[in-house]
Structures are given as C-alpha cells and as structure tokens.
Image (spheres, rainbow, N blue to C red):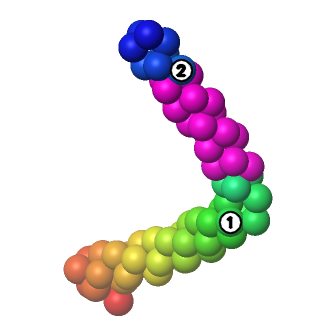
Amino acid sequence: MAFIIITATTLLGCLVSLILVVRTRKFYKGDIYKKFRGEAKAADTEMACAGTRRSSGRRKLWLIYRGRG
C-alpha cells in the first residue's frame, strides 16, 4: 500500500511540474521576452556607437604621437 501512495504522489508531482513548465514557456514567449529582446538590441547599438568613439580617440592619439595632430 505504501508503494502505491508514493507512486501516486510522484506522478501527481510530475504532472504539476509539467503544467508549470508549459505555463512558463508561454509566459516567456509573450511580451516580456519581446521587451528584453528590444533592450538587448538597444544595448548592442549603444555599444557599437561607443566602440566607434573609442576607436576615433585612438586614431587621434596615434596622430598626436606621430606628430600629425
């Protein structure tokens, strides 16, 4: 009898876990995931602009070092 109780409890826990997995996947496919994707794209654009400024600063330093700036 104890084996049946343990088995039933385990199967019930498995079912609840699967339901939560499905709900979580639906949640992350929704608007919240799109929001984070948009923020990541904005951060990439910002980093690209910062990289351009940094490289132009290096160019200026190189020209000054070479006596052309």
Q: Residue at x 52, y 32 (%)?
A: 13
Alpha carbons under labels 2 and 1: distance apart: 36 Å
Say which of 47 and 56 sits in front: 47
- SS at badge 1: helix
Disc marking residue 54: none
The image position of residue 14, as x and y in percent, is: 55, 28
Specify the quadrant of the image occupied by residue 20. Answer: top right
Dot 2 corresponds to which residue?
Answer: 8
Q: Is residue 62 magenta?
A: no
Q: Which mark is residue 32?
A: 1
Q: Residue furthest left?
A: 65
The mark that comes first in sequence, 2 or 1, is 2
Q: Please name the residue shown 47% across and 77% down the image.
A: 50
Vertical position of residue 33 compared to residue 8: above or below:
below
Magenta span of residues: 9-26
Residue type marked 2: Ala
